[in-house]
Image (cartoon, rainbow, N blue to C red):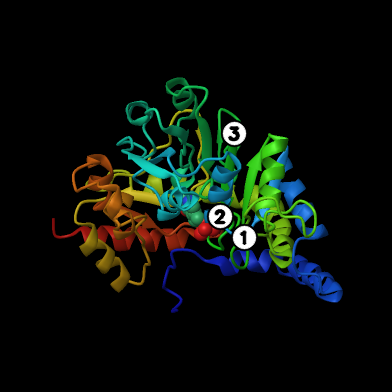
Amino acid sequence: MSDRTVPLVDLGLQHRQVAEDVQAGWEAVLERTAFVLGDEVATFEQAYADFIGVSHCVGVANGTDSLELALRALDIGPGDEVVVPANTFVASALAVRRSGATPVLVDVDADHLLIEPGQVAEAVGPRTRAVMPVHLYGQMAPMRELAACCDPDLAIVEDCAQAQGATQRGAHAGTFGAISGTSFYPGKNLGAYGDAGAVLTDDEGLARRVRALRNYGSEQKYVHDEIGFNSRLDTLQAVVLTAKLTWLGRWNEERQQASRRYEHLLEGVERVTTPRVAPGNAHVWHLYVVRVPGREDILRGMAEMGVQAGIHYPTPVHRLGAFRDLGYSAGDFPITEAASSEILSLPIYPGITEAQQDRVVDALVASLEPS
Ligand SMILES: *Cc1c(COP(=O)(O)O)cnc(C)c1O
């Protein structure tokens, strides 16, 4: 990568800040050759539960599993429906499918591209057991409005994978639902050095259920009362996550600062719509997603100038081959579909420099011409 290239994310900057802690922690694990669960996992689970403000955090192998196990802990499965936004990463809907339940997709609001409570109310039917709001790009879905439009019997299962540290009216993502899942994939705001995830809940019974499900369906060694999974958080990953958690607040502030700078630099650039923060939300800018017509040419132009932009996501869930059997077609979710052809994620990460942001905006503006 040349000096002048601006990557979509730079994980090396974060690594250098925690490298010593990670090395010391890893050496202790290697010394004991104990690699699955153990003290380091319990330490991280407690620290993350405290940070979010929930009673229980259960570390699992990845974010997709966290959502599937959350649904299974609620006994959601075949014959049940779960409402999911069409504008999300595939894993939200995948987790519903893998639990055996049917994802019922809904459109998002045009301003924030988050699940739209009015659409949810219309999608709920006699088989609906849960709603899965996705806190996309780093800000929370409208939880108060969702709660107001949903029967209290419906479980809310939050997908917090893009929102570590995000709050709404002061409460963290992951504290609103009956149970929530999150991912610590390396590129998330809190990222491991491989795959990792966690389930969050205040409900002791659900937490116990997930602890068993992640461990072959066993609460007691060699006693298996249900079909479980092998989906545990690695000890080595727990060391990384504990080290990084102490930096997460600062890193999220750096993302917020970078977002303000983009907003300022893009002021008055016609044709580029900058992202909006919904009322009550503290946004943690997992992604900085602008909208711009002619996105494909702009993406190519920026790449030629050494700026890596991204698309999150080019194909809405209902247009993916894996979900063909759900029977949706083009035009079913017009807001999601219109957004998918215009959204462009600009590089954002803790430690991005002002000079890098200038290069991003220069490349974007240069790629807009000729109009
Ligand atoms: C990353 C992500 C997931 C899945 O997490 P993995 O750890 O990759 O399995 C789920 N939902 C959303 C919104 C994500 O961004």
Q: How many marks?
A: 3
At x 77%, y 71%, the residue is 26
Tell me which amino acid carries mark 2.
Asp
* Quadrant for the C terminus in the image: bottom left
Q: Answer yes or no: disc 3 within 8 Å of ligand 1.
A: no
The residue carrying pointer 3 sits among few (fewer than 14), some (14 to 19) or many (20 or more) residues within 10 Å by Cα, namely some
Circle 3 SS class: loop
The answer to whether 323 appears left or right of 293 in the picture is right
Q: CA distance from mark 2 to mark 3?
A: 17 Å
Is residue 204 at least partly visible in the picture?
yes
Q: CA distance from mark 2 to mark 1?
A: 7 Å
Q: Which residue is mark 2?
A: 65
At x 27%, y 57%, the residue is 365
Circle 2 SS class: helix
Measured as percent of width and height from the top left, residue 350 is found at 56, 57
At x 43%, y 64%, the residue is 8
Q: Answer yes or no: disc 2 within 8 Å of ligand 1.
A: yes
Q: Which residue is mark 3?
A: 178
At x 17%, y 60%, the residue is 369
Tell me which amino acid carries mark 1.
Ala
